[in-house]
Image: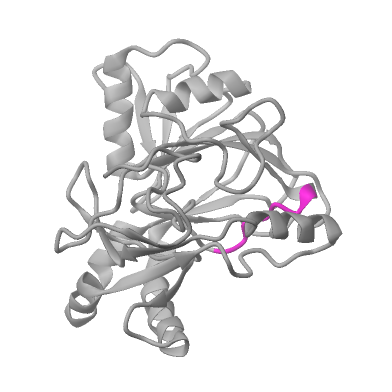
Amino acid sequence: MSSTGFDVRRIGGRIGAEILGVDLTQELDPALVTEINAALLEHKALVFRDQHLDDDQQQRFASLFGELTTAHPTVPSAEGQPNVLSVDGEAGQRANRWHTDVTFVRTPPKASTLRSIVVPPYGGNTLIANSQAAYEDLPEPLREFADRAWAIHTNDYDYAVPRDQRSAERRAQFVSRKYRTAHPVVRVHPETGARGLFVGGFARTLLGFDSEQSQELLRVLQSYVTRPENIVRIAWNPGDVVLFDNRATQHYAPDDYGDLPRLLHRVTVAGDVPVGVDGRTSYVVEGDEAEHYTPAVA
């Protein structure tokens, strides 16, 4: 029980907790927000059940943790809601690869909120992994390598294989503005100082290595992120809200619900420029600073 009266119930050994006794439809006291943020830093992913927010309420909640981004650097927002991304399975929006949101720009989001609107009767879960625990799992020689390594993240690859014409059109929209950004493979968390692996699906090559070598090394690093003990599985009910720390996690939405409808709305909080172990910061290789998406932080 927190000092402001809500309960935190762990749902995974290394990641994930349900927050009980908080009504996100109401204005939240700053002290409560501070405690929720502390729980987020500890558990990386927080689940608020049975909230049934609308878009405005979801945006109000997300904005308690910082300035909002627009919906996406390249993909259109939900109609009339420039800060809301519609994640619609029927439209081919199935993020069934491990990734951290929007790491192909210099300032990826600090945090993401997902709100379930329509969920299938089976499947359609979201898996979230603790990338800081993954870093701690690395053998010392591999950890030393990761501390020095840099990766190029880009949106210009087959992130989601088109299922039909509609999803093919979405794929074309996704890469309509191309980005390549160099990020440290190990990111130092700006609030806690903890180190975490900062790779995932948008990380395509390592500086100093060719494509084949990069993929093999990234595969090894990624295997630590997706170890079962580092993952929590969120089974959605309509009206649920999930808040996760985009600086310390990856997530994956299994494409295991056939042609059933699944609709979530995503709102993200603007982040800062990732910092590596040596203090160097991420930089743009191709594209722009994505100021239209979130103000770049020097």
Q: Is residue 95 magenta?
A: yes
Drawn side of residue 238 relative to residue 179, left or right = right
What residue is drawn where x is 21% and y is 70%? 147
What residue is drawn where x is 30% and y is 15%? 30
Residue 276 at what x, y percent from top left?
22, 60
What residue is drawn where x is 56% and y is 43%? 72
Q: How is the image coloured?
A: one colour
Q: Nearer the viewer, residue 272 or 45?
A: 272
Residue 187 at what x, y percent from top left?
26, 58
What residue is drawn where x is 58% and y is 19%? 56
Drawn side of residue 118 relative to residue 72, left or right = right
State how many labels appear: 0
Q: Is residue 1 visible?
A: no
Residue 138 at what x, y percent from top left?
26, 73
Residue 231 at what x, y percent from top left?
44, 57
Q: Is residue 258 magenta?
A: no
* Magenta segment: 91-97
Q: Is residue 33 visible?
A: yes
Q: Quadrant of the C terminus?
A: top left
Drawn side of residue 201 relative to residue 247, left or right = right
The secondary structure making up most of the magenta span is: loop
* Above or below, comparing residue 29 to residue 285 in the picture: above
Drawn side of residue 26 relative to residue 14, left or right = right
- Place residue 22 in its image quadrant: top left
